[in-house]
Image (cartoon, rainbow, N blue to C red):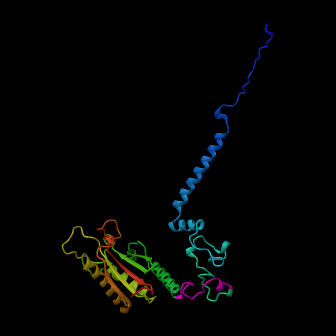
């Protein structure tokens, strides 16, 4: 005790030691979250690359539907009344837009029935779709879209549009459809004409023929592209009529010169082509 009667106060602070920063566990949680996020990101990138545009649109519409959902009509008998996220590929079976030929009173009360202006796809349209599929199968059986060297159908591609079924016939390097700068067909085009005439006999749709040619390397004072493309389309018409195609089924012949190219190179022989269009029945004449 001091002389003045005051006892000094001694405060002892004890600092407990802990693990260094790199020995803690918080960073492991953060790192695990980061790895998980990166894995999810790369899986997303892989899925985007592995799916088509149509499939991605269907998945997006599934999570954010832009099509009104009816409590009865769903296009199928699965969960929620549908069997696929790709709703555009599934026809409604009842209710609004229903395709039942004899809907029940409940279904009829829920929406339009087949046959009226707001109902199902007309039977004529469904029949045309079946005929188009039949033609595609016949062309595939003839070697359509094949690149075998001895097959004339390697010059042929097909696609379906709102206008109808388009059968495109095009030049290949060293294998033209017409003699150079003329409308005189080669033997290859004659063989293709015989095949198409037989296949087109399966239906009664009218036909439109479009002629296209490649661009010229220089600007000419009198560009022969218009006359030549029209002449080639006319030549194709005559070939098919000589093979047995009914003359009255040809609705129009058109020449587009070099105005609608399909190859990046305007002077590519791929631009020399004919388009034979089997028109849908609802197309204006």
Q: Position of residue 97 (x, y in %)?
A: 58, 82
Q: Is residue 78 left or right of residue 163?
A: right
Snapshot quadrant of residue 266: bottom left
Q: Is residue 233 left or right of residue 102?
A: left
Q: Position of residue 284 (x, y in %)?
A: 41, 86
Residue 188 sits above or below residue 31 on the image: below
User: Which image quarter holds the N terminus?
Assistant: top right
Q: Position of residue 169 (x, y in %)?
A: 37, 77
The number of callouts visible is 0
View extreme (top): residue: 3
Q: Position of residue 37 (x, y in %)?
A: 59, 50
Snapshot quadrant of residue 226: bottom left
Residue 83 sits above or below residue 278 on the image: above
Near-viewer residue (135 or 72): 72
Near-viewer residue (44 or 157): 44
Residue 267 sits above or below residue 205 on the image: above
User: Which image quarter holds the C terminus?
Assistant: bottom left
- Magenta segment range? 106-123
Near-viewer residue (146 or 123): 123
Near-viewer residue (46 or 90): 90
* Magenta stretch encompasses residue 242: no
């Amino acid at each position: 005790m001091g002389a003045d009667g005051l006892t000094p106060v001694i405060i002892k602070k004890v600092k407990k030691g802990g693990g260094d920063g790199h020995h803690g566990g918080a960073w492991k949680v953060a790192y695990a979250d980061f790895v998980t996020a990166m894995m999810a990101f790369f899986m997303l990138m892989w899925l985007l690359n592995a799916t088509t545009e149509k499939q991605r649109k269907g998945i997006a519409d599934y999570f954010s539907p832009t099509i009104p959902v009816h409590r009865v009509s769903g296009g199928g008998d699965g969960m929620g009344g549908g069997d696929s996220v790709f709703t555009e590929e599934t026809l409604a079976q009842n209710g609004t837009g229903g395709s039942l030929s004899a809907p029940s009173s409940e279904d009829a009360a829920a929406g339009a029935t087949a046959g009226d202006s707001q109902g199902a796809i007309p039977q004529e349209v469904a029949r045309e779709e079946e005929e188009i599929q039949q033609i595609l199968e016949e062309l595939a059986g003839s070697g359509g879209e094949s690149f075998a060297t001895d097959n004339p159908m390697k010059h042929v591609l097909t696609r379906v549009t709102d206008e109808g079924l388009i059968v495109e016939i095009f030049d290949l390097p060293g294998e033209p459809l017409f003699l150079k700068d003329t409308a005189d067909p080669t033997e290859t085009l004659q063989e293709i004409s015989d095949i198409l005439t037989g296949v087109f006999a399966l239906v009664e749709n009218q036909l439109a023929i479009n002629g296209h040619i490649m661009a010229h390397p220089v600007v000419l004072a009198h560009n022969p592209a218009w006359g030549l493309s029209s002449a080639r389309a006319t030549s194709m018409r005559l070939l098919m009529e000589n093979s047995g195609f009914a003359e009255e089924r040809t609705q129009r012949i058109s020449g587009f010169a070099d105005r609608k190219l399909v190859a990046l190179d305007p002077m590519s022989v791929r631009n020399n082509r004919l388009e034979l269009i089997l028109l849908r029945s609802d197309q204006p004449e």
